[in-house]
Amino acid sequence: MKKHAMTAALTLLCASYAHAQSSVTLYGVIDEGLQFVNNNKNVVNGHNVGGRQWTLDSTNGINGSRWGLRGAEDLGGGLAAIFTLESGVNLNNGALGQGGAEFGRQAFVGISSATLGAMTLGRQYDSIFWYVQPVTTLGYLGSAAFAHPGDLDNTNNSLRLNNTIRYASANYRGLTFGGELSLGGQAGNITAGSGYNAGVAYTNGPLALGAAYEYFKNPTGATGSTGFFTGNPNGATQLSGVLNSGYVSATSYQVIAAGATYRIGNAIMNIGYSNVEYGNITALRGNSAKFNTAEAGIKYQFTPAFSAGLGYTYTKGNAVDNGAGGTVGNQHFNQLAALGDYFVSRRTDFYAEASVQKASGVSSTGGAAVANIGNLGDSSTPHQVAVRLAMRHRF
């Protein structure tokens, strides 16, 4: 009897110990807002006409609505097994986000060490998200209202990377760095559909710096869930607006991005720059198209509960020889955005934001350039205004 009792006690003790060394956290964000866009292109009888659009939206806020599970198990020796499963949610119809992927925001497993960093495998954010986005106006201020036109450089993390191996360093006195390799998975061609990226960040007192590089070969896949631009199950592409849809036949995609923030009292300011290149566009005789974007912004914390900010972005697309004696893509975008955010509790806030954009020049398809704030959709004119009134709750 004593042996049985002792065995049961030891079993219970071991189970309690294992449980104490492991954790699984359920978390999420619900970000729902009334959104107005003054001019979204609407094709009627073959003609493009502008249309005002009122929607309830839960995907283009400061945080896209989501829920997730995050877990860790202590393996001893300073190592831990970790995982994250995170799903985007459309609050207004219950649909999954990210093209219908069940865990389309993140889905990975790996090993972490407090001194050596972490290695993770699965569907993940790129280095632009980890190292550059925090020092962009969008990163410390707001959402799609502050995104660059069409999210050309992925600083609004519209796209994730499938089949990806990621290394992220520990924090070495303010210095962090990392890199990723995405496998194309094509038999007989180990580079097709593959990509890689790397980034570095440094924080010292009021100053924060970040930079990243990304390259992807064959960024448009033949089917959904393949390629970089078409990595969601429904195969939707980031080359849907006329600012870059003429470059869908590019066989490479490259981004160089960097930025910095600086805090002075209750204010934080930033500057940022990115260069995007669509390489070897077969429909345009193998020429390349480039976009250069510069931004600046400021945020001020008026009270512990209320903050407001302003951001300006300028994007320039270069002219590309179309092989028919002309050029496409010589386009310019000027964008101004503002945000006010008020917290009524630690987890709940209300915010209002607005953005106005003006486009000029020639689009990638050869027509007149049109505005497109974030990826809210092409305007039928060079101008577009977006306004959002929203509530956000974290759990």
Image (tube, rainbow, N blue to C red):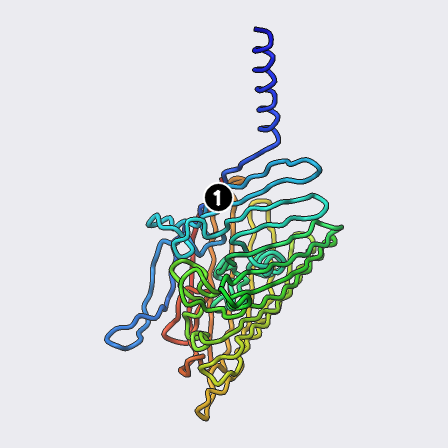
Instruction: From the viewer's perspective, tell me whether residue 208 is left or right of residue 357.
Output: right
Q: Could you say where residue 174 lies in the image, as x and y percent from the top left?
A: 73, 52
- Residue in the image at 68% along x and 48% along y: 117
Q: Farthest residue in the top direction?
A: 1
Give the camera-side residue of 254 and 275: 254
Q: Farthest residue in the left direction?
A: 45
Q: Could you say where residue 392 lies in the image, as x and y percent from the top left?
A: 46, 46
Residue underneath mark 1: 68
Amino acid at the residue labelled 1: Gly
Q: Could you say where residue 354 lies in the image, as x and y percent from the top left?
A: 46, 61
- Residue in the image at 42% along x and 83% along y: 366
Give the camera-side residue of 141 and 29: 29
SS class, disc 1: strand
Give the camera-side residue of 373 and 173: 173
Number of labelled discs?
A: 1
Instruction: From the viewer's perspective, tell me whether residue 151 is left or right of residue 263.
Output: left
Q: Is residue 53 above or below residue 75?
A: below
- Residue in the image at 29% along x and 72% along y: 43
Quadrant of the rendered image containing residue 41? bottom left
Instruction: From the viewer's perspective, tell me whether residue 372 is left or right of residue 175.
Output: left
Q: Could you say where residue 35 lies in the image, as x and y percent from the top left?
A: 39, 57
Please rate how many residues cluster around mark 1, counting C-alpha atoms within 10 Å: few if below 14, some from 14 to 19, many from 20: some
Quadrant of the rendered image containing residue 114? top right
Q: Farthest residue in the front direction?
A: 188
Quarter of the image containing the N terminus?
A: top right
Q: Farthest residue in the right direction?
A: 173
